Image (cartoon, grey):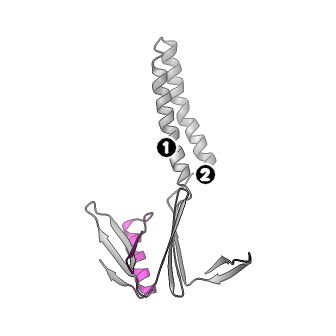
């Protein structure tokens, strides 16, 4: 697996990473598709509101507007988080976890030889996967189901010097 690295002088060098996994949320619609679905869903309340206002019940229109605002906000939220991801890279003596949520990107660098992989259950039945090293802790696998988290925990344990705790 290769990754590109940008140096300070602007040159781009290809580097080899030992292991890399990228996890993204399921985003099956394109931005144009989301606009089309929004317009399709917005047409129905507008026509219902027009029908009621023609019958003399014009007070329905503020509620139609409120409904359209809530629907537009939901689609805006989905659009903002469509490019979220988690990336785990093991490269020589570094374990790099990069997370992107909306416009924030955070990066955690751990030593893979000292890392601990912790897989713990929560009361609702979900599993949470943590990577820990030297007082740092980062949760990974937020876009995965329980089976995928367990498989990732086993892979990370095999590819690092990590201890594995359930």
The residue wearing badge 2 is 30
Q: Is 147 one of the magenta-colored residues?
A: yes
Could you tell me how far apart the alpha carbons at marks 1 and 2 are, in whole angstroms?
15 Å
Q: Which mark is residue 74?
A: 1
Q: Nearer the viewer, residue 3 or 11?
A: 11
Q: Residue at x 68, y 81 (%)?
A: 14
Furthest toward the top, the residue is 56
On screen, residue 44 above or below 1 = above
Secondary structure at badge 1 equals helix
User: Looking at the figure, which quarter contains the N terminus?
Assistant: bottom right
Q: Position of residue 30 (x, y in %)?
A: 61, 51
Secondary structure at badge 2 equals loop
Q: Is the residue marked by circle 2 packed among few (<14), some (14-19), or many (20+) residues within 10 Å?
A: few
Q: Is 30 one of the magenta-colored residues?
A: no
Of callouts 1 and 2, the N-terminal one: 2
Q: Position of residue 82 (x, y in %)?
A: 55, 55
Q: Position of residue 134 (x, y in %)?
A: 39, 81
Range of magenta residues? 134-162
Furthest toward the left, the residue is 123
Single out the mark in the foreground, 1 or 2. Answer: 1
Q: Position of residue 130 (x, y in %)?
A: 38, 73
């Amino acid at each position: 697996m290769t990754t590109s690295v940008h140096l300070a002088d602007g040159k781009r060098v290809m580097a080899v990473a030992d292991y890399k996994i990228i996890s993204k949320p399921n985003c099956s619609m394109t931005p144009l598709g989301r606009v089309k679905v929004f317009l399709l869903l917005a047409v129905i309340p507008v026509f219902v509101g027009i029908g009621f206002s023609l019958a003399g019940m014009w007070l329905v229109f503020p509620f139609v507007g409120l409904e359209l605002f809530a629907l537009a906000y939901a689609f805006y939220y989905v659009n903002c988080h469509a490019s979220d991801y988690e990336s785990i890279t093991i490269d020589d003596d570094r374990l790099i976890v990069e997370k992107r949520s909306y416009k924030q990107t955070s990066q955690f660098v751990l030593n893979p030889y000292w890392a601990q992989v912790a897989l713990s259950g929560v009361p609702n039945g979900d599993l949470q996967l943590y990577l820990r090293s030297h007082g740092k802790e980062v949760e990974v696998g937020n876009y995965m189901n329980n089976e995928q988290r367990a498989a990732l925990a086993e892979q990370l344990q095999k590819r690092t010097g990590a201890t594995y705790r359930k």
